[in-house]
Amino acid sequence: MQYETKKRSMLKAISWRTWATITTAVIVFIFTGEFALAVTVGLLEVFAKMGLYFFHERCWHRISYGKKQIPAFVLWFTGLPASGKKALADCVYQRLVDEKLKVERLDGLDVRPLFPETGFSPTEVNRHVKRAGHLCAMLEKNGVIVVASFVSPYRESRVFARGLATNFVEVYMKSTVAACEQRDDRGHYLKARNGEYQHFPGVDAVYDEPVNPEITIEVDAVSVEAAADQIVNYLRTHFLHNG
């Protein structure tokens, strides 16, 4: 995902040779006492070795031996509303960004405005999640790691999204309806119970629990940081490992 540009190689060559040339000139002056000779030797050396260093770097850039390719993948967070998907996905995303990886973040709240006519019936939700799956797969095929968080309550559309991706990691935010309702500071569960929302997972619509998720987070038993550690450790083992 990352590569050394020619400009970067050139800047490295200049910085390295500047210090090396100063060292060489000082050594020549110490042994000969000739300032002009020290400067001359230093100038000749800097141009010769800068060029050699640049071509040495570019040659090694073309050699695949010792390089480790980090595969792109889709990290898909699913769980009941207010199970903490967004907060944990944001945390993991930031950690991957800190690793200087090529990563994008997709969340249900950000994607849904792209399709404003989409409703919340099971059919429409499945269609919406499948569209999100297509978007994630397109990014992955272009070498981008995707951190996606969607309630995605129905197994059908999650299986569809998995089938589109080459590397799909499902993170199940396991919690109870009661615990999620307590965490719901926006009042969505209350509105669903009052009939203001229809087809709300956990109230008047089912949430199909994942059967074999790659990662299960016991939401009510771990902190966001501890859960992020669990996920990043899994990613290091399966995708980000070195050696």
Image: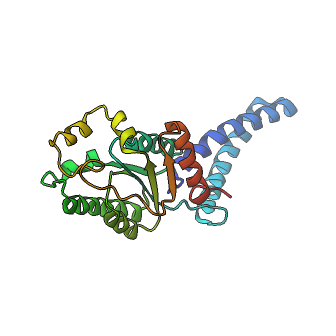
Left or right of 217 in this view: 203: left
- As displayed, is residue 29 above or below residue 136? above
Give the side of residue 196 with respect to residue 187, left or right: left
Q: Nearer the viewer, residue 59 or 225?
A: 225
212 or 137: which is nearer to us? 212
Residue 100 picture location, percent across and down: 51, 46
Residue 129 sits in which quadrant? Answer: bottom left
Asked if 108 appears above or below 162 in the picture, the reply is: above
**Outermost residue toward the left?**
117
| Towards the viewer: 69 or 221 | 221
Residue 19 image position (x, y, % from top left): 69, 36
Residue drawn at the location 45% of the way across and 68% of the way down:
166
Q: Quadrant of residue 195?
A: top left
How many tags in the picture?
A: 0
- The image position of residue 84, as x and y in percent, is 40, 41
Residue at the farthest right position: 31
> Dividing the image into 4 quarters, which one contains the C terminus?
bottom right
Q: Left or right: where does residue 176 sit relative to residue 201?
A: right
Q: Where 101 falls versus 213 (above or below)?
A: above
Q: How is the image coloured?
A: rainbow
Residue displayed at 52% across by 43% down = 228
Question: Could you tell me which residue is drawn at 30 percent across and 56 percent down?
Answer: 206
- Residues 224 and 131: in front is 224
Residue 202 locus on image (x, y percent): 30, 49
Question: Toward which corner of the image does residue 235 lie, by quadrant?
Answer: bottom right
Residue at 37% across / 69% down in the picture?
Answer: 164
Could you tell whether 2 is left or right of 151 in the image? right
